[in-house]
């Protein structure tokens, strides 16, 4: 029988009053419940200031069990305690099942300390508050520098953008002109190019405050990311100006942050001018379809055709997958967009515009029919592309026949 039960039994006797008071009073042991001393048990690993932490979270560890937990502001974090030969061993209650002992974290102070309240519910359901030194704890963050961390096998430091081939491109002129309503939002943002772990190119369009999440292969927008965002490294855009984009990289627990700088590349108009020199307007298949010679290849174009220069040569983008790969940045290169044929004082003229490989520059082009070629003669020529299209009617050309 416990001391308290014994005390209750004594009170039930008629002579209890004489036993509990006066000269014959009995002395009972001190039954006051006390808070456990967690000052050396509870370790503060750092606060989680990630933008998806919803107001801040705190990374905690228990010294006796080495268990870790990320606690929200003012969350009740319940603890279990078991005895061992080394003394009491504390652990976090599985699935947050309530226990008589819990802690609550409050905001971090200017010097980086977190305030922790220790709560213990007594036998009579009252909160124990003594000793006072054990009720309110101020925990310091780790004094030593935290271990380095990685994303995709690369150490995260100031040189991370170079190692992961991250490049700030700037405003995408192609999407501004040809993206339409579907890409209107992206066209107003800054394009950043990445390379996935599978060595595939892809682009993301970012503004201040935008967030990307690492899925193990590439950086995904919040809407496309599958899974719990708190379990993925995070990329947050903090500032953008004409020269540089500043972003923060966060580890999973939100205890480590690395600021990186992405300098915008400065494109040169010379790139487009050199590419234009490869294009010759040599004839006409009809009054709307010019015949062009590009890098030794002869192509027949229709209005709104897109022709891309790749490492293998010039290629007309006619299939839906080819167009999608170019729009999303999976394939890159200078792009010729043919608009129409006109006739002026120089004769027949091919008009269109050319984008550089990064799609940050666009130049209007106007190519006259090369001297020595007559439209009537050239109109009799049929390219191999036309014969191929006739043999495969299912492969339709974008914007033209």
Image (spheres, rainbow, N blue to C red):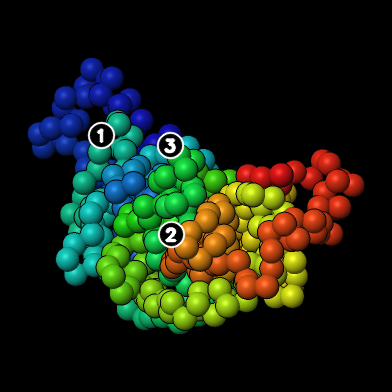
Give the residue pinned by disc 1.
126
Q: Residue at x 48, y 59 (%)?
A: 344
Q: Secondary structure at mark 1?
A: loop
| Residue 186: percent from left, percent from top | 43, 50
Is there a contact, CB below 8 Å, between mark 2 and mark 1? no
Which numbered disc flags the more N-terminal residue, 2 or 1? 1
- Left or right: where 42 falls relative to 388: left
Q: Residue 27, relative to residue 175: is it above or below?
A: above
Q: CA distance from mark 2 to mark 3?
A: 58 Å
| Residue 40: percent from left, percent from top | 35, 67
Q: CA distance from mark 3 to mark 1?
A: 15 Å
Name the mark nearer the viewer: 2 or 3: 2
Q: Residue at x 27, y 68 (%)?
A: 241
Q: Is residue 132 visible?
A: yes
Q: Is residue 332 visible?
A: no
In front of the other: 80 or 323: 323
Which numbered disc flags the more N-terminal residue, 2 or 3? 3
Give the residue pinned by disc 2.
173
Q: Could you say which quadrant of the image residue 165 lies in?
A: bottom right
Tag of residue 98: 3
């Amino acid at each position: 029988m416990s001391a308290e039960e014994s005390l209750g039994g004594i009170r039930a006797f008629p002579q209890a009053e004489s036993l509990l008071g006066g000269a014959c009073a009995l002395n009972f042991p001190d039954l006051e419940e006390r808070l456990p001393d967690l000052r050396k048990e509870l370790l503060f690993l750092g606060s989680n200031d990630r933008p998806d932490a919803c107001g801040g979270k705190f990374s905690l560890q228990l010294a006796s069990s080495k268990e870790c937990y990320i606690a929200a502001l003012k969350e009740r974090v319940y603890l279990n305690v078991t005895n061992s030969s080394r003394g009491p061993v504390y652990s976090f209650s599985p699935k947050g099942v309530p226990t008589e002992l819990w802690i609550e974290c409050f905001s971090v102070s200017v010097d980086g300390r977190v305030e922790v309240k220790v709560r213990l519910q007594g036998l009579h359901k009252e909160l124990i508050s003594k000793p006072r030194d054990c009720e309110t704890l101020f925990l310091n963050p780790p004094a030593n520098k935290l271990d380095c961390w990685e994303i995709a096998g690369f150490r995260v430091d100031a040189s991370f953008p170079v190692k992961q081939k991250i490049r700030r491109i700037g405003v995408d002129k192609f999407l501004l002109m040809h993206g339409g309503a579907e890409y209107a939002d992206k066209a107003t943002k800054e394009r950043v190019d990445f390379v996935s772990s599978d060595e595939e190119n892809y682009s993301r369009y970012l503004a201040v405050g935008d967030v990307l999440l690492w899925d193990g292969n590439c950086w995904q927008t919040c809407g496309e990311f599958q899974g719990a965002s708190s379990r993925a490294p995070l990329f947050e855009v903090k500032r953008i100006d004409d020269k540089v984009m500043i972003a923060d990289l966060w580890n999973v627990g939100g205890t480590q942050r690395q600021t990186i700088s992405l300098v915008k590349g400065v494109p040169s108009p010379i790139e487009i001018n050199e590419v234009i020199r490869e294009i010759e307007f040599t004839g006409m298949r009809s009054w709307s379809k010019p015949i062009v010679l590009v890098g030794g290849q002869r192509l027949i174009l229709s209005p709104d055709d897109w022709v891309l220069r790749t490492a293998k040569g010039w290629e007309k983008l006619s299939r839906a997958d080819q167009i999608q790969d170019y729009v999303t940045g999976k394939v890159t290169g200078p792009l010729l967009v043919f608009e129409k044929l006109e006739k002026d004082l120089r004769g027949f003229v091919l008009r269109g515009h050319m984008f550089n490989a990064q799609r940050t520059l666009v130049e209007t082009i106007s190519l006259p029919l090369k001297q020595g070629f007559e439209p009537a003669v050239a109109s009799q020529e049929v390219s191999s592309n036309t014969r191929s299209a006739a043999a495969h009617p299912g492969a339709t050309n974008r914007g033209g026949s």
